[in-house]
Image (tube, rainbow, N blue to C red):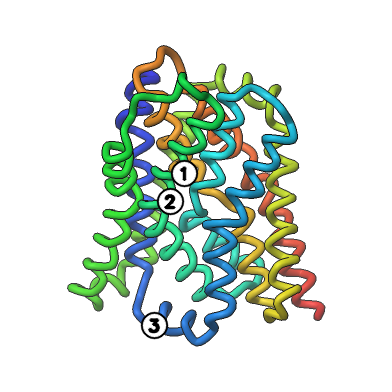
Amino acid sequence: MTTETIIIFAVPVAVFVMMLALGLGLTLADFRSALRRPMALFLGVASQIVLVPVAGFLFVSAQQQDPGLSLGIVLLTLCPGAAMSNLLTRIAGGDVALSVSLTAISNLLSAATLPALSLLAASHFLGPEVSRVDFGDLTLRVLMVATVPVLLGMAIRHLAPRFTERYEPAAFRTCLAVFIAIIGWSFIEVADALRFGLVLIGWQLVLLTFLLLGLGLALGQACGLSTPQRTTIAVETGVQNSGLGLAAGAMLWGDGAGFPLFATPSVVYGALTYALTFPVVILLSRRWQRV
């Protein structure tokens, strides 16, 4: 598998499959349940769409590192967590219905926020070297890999509710396995870029991950949310969609030779994030069980 095949075909397919699984798991009951707690829903969406990108931008600005890698980290913060954040929320004892609703809403909103803010970030960090990808093309690509599959999954569930309810757990496991297999194989194929990124920015992504988890937890506590809701906000704030970040970085890289530099942080994050977040959510789950 060549780098070009990974970027053009494998990663978008992996993201599409995982977003489809997310859509299959969504019901109107999930949204109604979340809407009964508007404060938690508003805080979660605002955290993912506003707080995380701002924190990421300030973080990389303070580091004064390579502009391309800085752009890649900001791109990652523009990609809200996918279905994996729902699984982590469940393990941590959070509000799963809220988590599912937040993931769906933020990913639908990313169809507008990701293209606009990524081009703005590219202009800031790269100046005249900004990619030639235009806004319309980038928006269309994001729609195809992140929004369309969610809507498709919701449509399938609406049209065939009994069939979907029966097979949705198996479909989720299958989609997750496909996603992990494709992304895992992609990481193996770009091992040199992964090692390069780990050395340069691995520690920064570790620090940023814990910073975002802490901000999400503190935000929920400051606003008086319940323990499960605080846990959900923390996970949804701290977990980003590395697959979508990789795809977005490749889109901005355009026709540049070699592995997309802008996608390197997402590759490193994808290799690190669950090793970092799983221990945190397990500790949270044990803490809440003792409360």
Q: Where is residue 125 shown, x and y percent of the image?
A: 56, 28
Provide the residue designation for mark 1: 117
Query: Helix, strand or loop at disc 2?
Result: helix
Mark sitting on residue 29: 3
Q: Are marks 1 and 2 in contact (CB under 8 Å)?
A: yes
Q: Where is residue 114 shown, x and y percent of the image?
A: 43, 46
Indicate which label's residue lies in the foreground, 2 or 3: 2
Provide the residue designation for mark 2: 113
Residue 281 appears in which quarter of the rendering?
bottom right
Residue farthest to the bottom, as pictured: 36
**Identity of the amino acid at label 1?**
Leu
Instruction: Judge by depth and name the residue closer to the eye, 131 or 32.
Output: 131
Q: What's the distance in space between the residues labelled 3 and 1, CA to CA?
A: 32 Å
**Identity of the amino acid at label 2?**
Thr
Instruction: Answer left or right for 155 relative to 21.
Output: left
- Residue 174 vertical position relative to residue 64 in the rendered view, above or below: below
Q: Earlier in the sequence, mark 3 or mark 1?
A: 3
Q: Where is residue 113 shown, x and y percent of the image?
A: 43, 51
Query: Helix, strand or loop at disc 1?
Result: helix
Q: Earlier in the sequence, mark 2 or mark 3?
A: 3
Q: Are marks 2 and 3 in contact (CB under 8 Å)?
A: no
